[in-house]
Amino acid sequence: MEDNFFERVYAIAKQIPEGRVTSYGAIAKALGTARSARMVGWAMNASHNRADVPAHRVVNRSGLLSGKHHFQGTNLMQQLLENEGIKVANNQILDFESVFWEPEVAELN
DNA sequence: AAGGTGACCGGCC
DNA sequence: TGGCCGGCCACCT
């Protein structure tokens, strides 16, 4: 299951600082506009096995918790974000621009 | 092997 | 941050 593609996405997600969030497109862009942001989301789907992947810090470009539906419970994702100081309301991140973190082109360590 | 799917994005109305 | 449509690419059956 260690497809390099997923590992690449995980590597970026792991680098997301606390209290910051990024978008799927940003990660895809960090991969060099690799393929499509869709694959990032797909990789996140598999990230359920990876506890090191803070998928809750990854939202869509609108700052909407699109993936919240895939988390356990109903508002677990929001809880985690708020726990890091990120304000969320109605599945929507407040001050999205302020907490947005653009992933650098950091490769595998 | 081919088709369907998906936690999206950008462009357009 | 309205709402809809096409495109993109890897994964699954």
Image (cartoon, coloured by chain):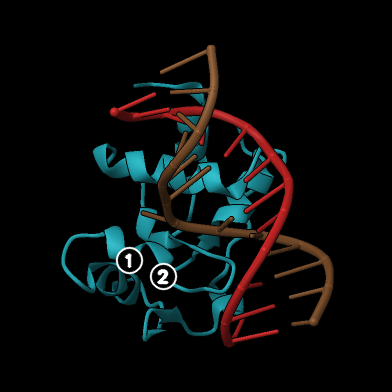
Chain colours: A cyan, B brown, C red
Q: Looking at the picture, which amino acid does disc 1 mark? A: Lys
Judging depth in this view, the residue of A3 and B12 nearest the camera is B12
Q: Quadrant of residue A82?
A: bottom left
Judging depth in this view, the residue of A52 and B3 nearest the camera is B3
The residue that label 1 is drawn on is: A68
Callout 1: chain:
A
| Residue A42 seen from this side | yes
Labels 1 & 2 near each other (Cβ < 8 A):
yes
Q: Residue at x 42, y 61 (%)?
A: A57
Q: Give the number of the disc on residue A65.
A: 2
- Mark 1 crowd level (few <14, some 14–19, many ≥20, 10 Å Cα): some
SS label for mark 1: helix
Q: Is residue A2 above or below residue A82?
A: above
Callout 2: chain:
A
Q: Give the number of the disc on residue A92.
A: none
Q: Position of residue A12 (x, y in %)?
A: 52, 43
